[in-house]
Amino acid sequence: MMSNQTITLGDFELTALSDGTYVGDGGAFFGVVPKVLWQRKVKPDDMNRIKVSCNAVLVRTGKHTVLIEAGIGNKLPEKTKSFFLPELKLMESLAASGTRREEIDVVINSHLHFDHCGWNTIYENGVAVPNFPNAKYYAPKGEWEHGSLQLERDRVSYISDNYDPLIRTGQMQLLGGELQEIIPGISVQAWPGHTRNMWAVFVRSAGKTACYISDLIPTTWHLEPTWVMAYDLFPLEAIENRKKYYERAIPEQWLTMFTHDPDVPWAYIMRQDGKISFQRV
Ligand SMILES: [Zn+2]
């Protein structure tokens, strides 16, 4: 597991927290991209699985302590766990950053797939309770509506215990997709492609911008606009929105945060000889 990395962004402090790795089918992560091409970037195991990470970001603004994303969590049934082999390290990473869960006052879920909101809640005597008792939680309203439909295509991705108990008590607020500020310097906006309502989370301080673009660009292996995942519900929009993202992120030097990259939690994106590449921080 990678250890926590901390950087400053303007007046804010950002710490990359990993929930550890899990494995997933390589083909699912690369869609129609031939294996002969993607395996140059990441080597699959003998079951064609690749190891990815779940990266969250802790933002200390001086006034607020914000957790962007909440990993897989420890509520998965044994059978599902045996399939994904998640390391479930987020709470350890948080402790290593010197932060108690009670100190988190804002939790933002970019979307409600179980690998992005799992630590929102934990089981206490079999009942899902808030894992961050003093936090206000935020998630996209359209994600909750879509997850509630329990469609055969993606119902396995939506586990209601990750969010419904928080919505029932009013601790989680569901918001629309228009650009809106959650606290000063941290805003969310829908960037469709992976799902219809997934948010990008923007962190802005003293003229600097970082963006948690979540599953729209899950790793540095996915920088090529057409290398979209088989999981994506709207692949054509994912391609267009990646290009739209680069049009701003490159000239404005946004620090891009990668949700599933096991080695690079954040990087600056560049265009080099017509190809999209990245520069480590
Ligand atoms: Zn997802």
Image (cartoon, rainbow, N blue to C red):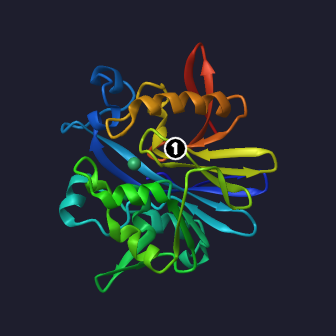
Residue 122 in the image, given as x and y percentages of width and height = 38, 75
Residue tagged by mark 1?
258
Residue 278 percent across, percent down from the top left:
58, 30
* Image point (61%, 73%), residue name: 105
Is disc 1's CB within 8 Å of ligand 1?
A: no
At x 39%, y 64%, the residue is 118
Closer to the camera, 21 or 224? 224
62 left or right, relative to 137: right
Q: Amino acid at mark 1?
A: Phe
Query: Front-most of 207 and 58?
Result: 207
**Whole-percent x, y for residue 111 in the image:** 45, 54
The relative height of residue 111 versus residue 104 in the rendered view (above or below) is above
Q: Residues within 10 Å of mark 1 (few under 14, many from 20)?
A: many
On screen, residue 155 versus residue 128, left or right, reads left
Residue drawn at 75 percent across, 67 percent down: 62
Tell me the quarter of the picture where residue 128 sits: bottom left
Residue 281 picture quarter: top right
Identify whether 126 is placed above or below 31: below
Task: Relative to 77, say whether 208 is above or below.
Answer: above
Residue 214 placement (x, y as % from top left) = 50, 46
